[in-house]
Image (cartoon, rainbow, N blue to C red):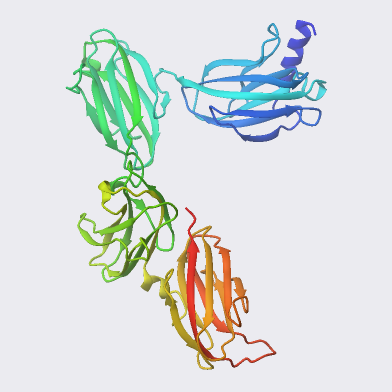
Amino acid sequence: MCRVARCLLLVSALLATATATPAQGNATLTPGASLDGEINDRWPRISWTFDGLQGQVIELQLEVTDGNLDPVLLLLDSEGQVLAASDDSQGGLVPFIAPLSLPVSGRYTVVVMRLGQALGSTSGSFRLDLQQIGVSSNAGSVLRYGDQVINRISQETPVVAYRFHARRGDVVQLHLRRASGDLDPWLQLQDSAGRELASNDDALDGPAPRDSRISDFLIETDGEYRILASRYGQEAGTSSGNFVLSLNEALFSGLGTTAATAIPIRPGISGRGSLDDEQHQRFYQFAGQAGERVRIRMARATGGLDPLLLLSDGQGRELVRDDDGGGGKNALIEDFRLPADGLYTITATRYELAEGQTSGPYRLELMLPDLVLQDLPGGTQLVTWGRAVEANLDNETPARLYAFQGGAEDVVTITMDRSSGNLDAVLNLLDEERELLTSDDDTGPGRNARIGDYTLPADGIYLVEATRYSGDEGATDTAGGFTLNLSRRISP
């Protein structure tokens, strides 16, 4: 095809991008990943989106893997405007969008289509690559952990500002070092309102004592933060030169890694985590009132973890701990009464703490029995895993109700075995809203009931109704003793 004709077709494709044949998929594209696709008469155009940050430098490359596809590659901004376009008209080269700095933070769209779109005739398979090359050093760029930028402080530009997004619990490390000139670096961290959180002039250690460093700063609130890179005296200073600014996240960064950034946990909602030599403990926090009973259980999911539980008050004073009270090597703090209103911290750790050698995933469960029972029918009894409950049924008490805490994807087995009399056992499993989930009459041996390998749909409180057969036929007045057992396979 002649060069003029190709240009006309390409221009036509660009003008028609927003209104032409609908794009297939419109799925999410992740920087650093490759995607495979196919262009044909049914799908002459495919698009993906990704979230980009101001100053993020990306490149796009397309490779035709099969067929005679004549592809066009487009990058659109959030308004649908074309930022860059490429086809294979230059000496048979594959479409390639060279490293490009994103102008603003927002959602971008990558479009792959054939020349002429619906009017085109080529088809074939392709592979698309989106790579993050780095970040622009221009002021206002949004940095990510691990980014490093180079810029210059001068009389004309005494302060250069950057931004980054952080979450509560992140532990941030900033380093500003001189790369040339007589620059005396100065560094400041601000919140989104411009309030100073930390600053540093001279690190006073290492081979460059005048470099600036903000180490292990704990982020208290989700949001956007600002970094100011400058010199001693800022606007009034006299030094100048190139600098290198790096933004990193500490190894122990993240929610739950310190008591100050404990993970909020609510009764009935499971906490999931994993412990190893690098992270041998995690912290959780809940609000309690004086006199309330609490029940906290930490059970290993898989592996060899030997759980240990600690409960502390708002001042960090340890109130109670347990190692193996939950059966096996699981930990259980049961019916502990809180001494005062306030926030309490649960430490989920392992036997011998930092010196311990066990590791693996775990499940943490918090229950406030009095609070749970006040919303349930009178006479409901709390039960726990692996502990048999014995009771009886008769005409005066034809059913008994039990409550337990479970987690999403846990696989539970509940058995009700007759221990005396002529009881014809029946089991009903209900959710917190008392909607029936499943039931069983005679799956167990004899007239015993068994609900086996049932997968719980969500975290929360569940009810077990232990009753007897009461159909129109058969002995509706059966009575006798029974043993109730609950077991489960925990989902990590």
Q: Nearer the viewer, residue 428 or 24?
A: 428
Residue at 71% from the left image edge and 21% from the top image edge: 65
Q: Above or below — where is 26 with respect to 442? A: above
- How many numbered discs, if any? 0
Residue 427 image offset from top left, x and y in percent: 57, 77
Task: Please state if 189 lies on the left or on the right of 129 as rendered.
Answer: left
Residue 277: name its quadrant: top left
Q: Nearer the viewer, residue 142 or 208?
A: 208
Residue at 44% from the left image edge and 55% from the top image edge: 301
Q: Above or below — where is 482 with respect to 325? A: below
Residue 319 image offset from top left, x and y in percent: 22, 62
Residue 214: name its quadrant: top left
Q: Nearer the viewer, residue 434 or 470?
A: 470
Q: Above or below — where is 208 with respect to 44? A: above
Residue at 27% from the left image edge and 27% from the top image edge: 188
Residue 41 image offset from top left, x and y in percent: 81, 28
Residue 356 image offset from top left, x and y in percent: 28, 49
Q: Nearer the viewer, residue 124 or 440?
A: 440
Task: Please state if 49 lies on the left or on the right of 88 as rendered.
Answer: left
Residue 270: name its quadrant: bottom left
Residue at 58% from the left image edge and 78% from the top image edge: 449
Q: Quadrant of the N terminus?
A: top right
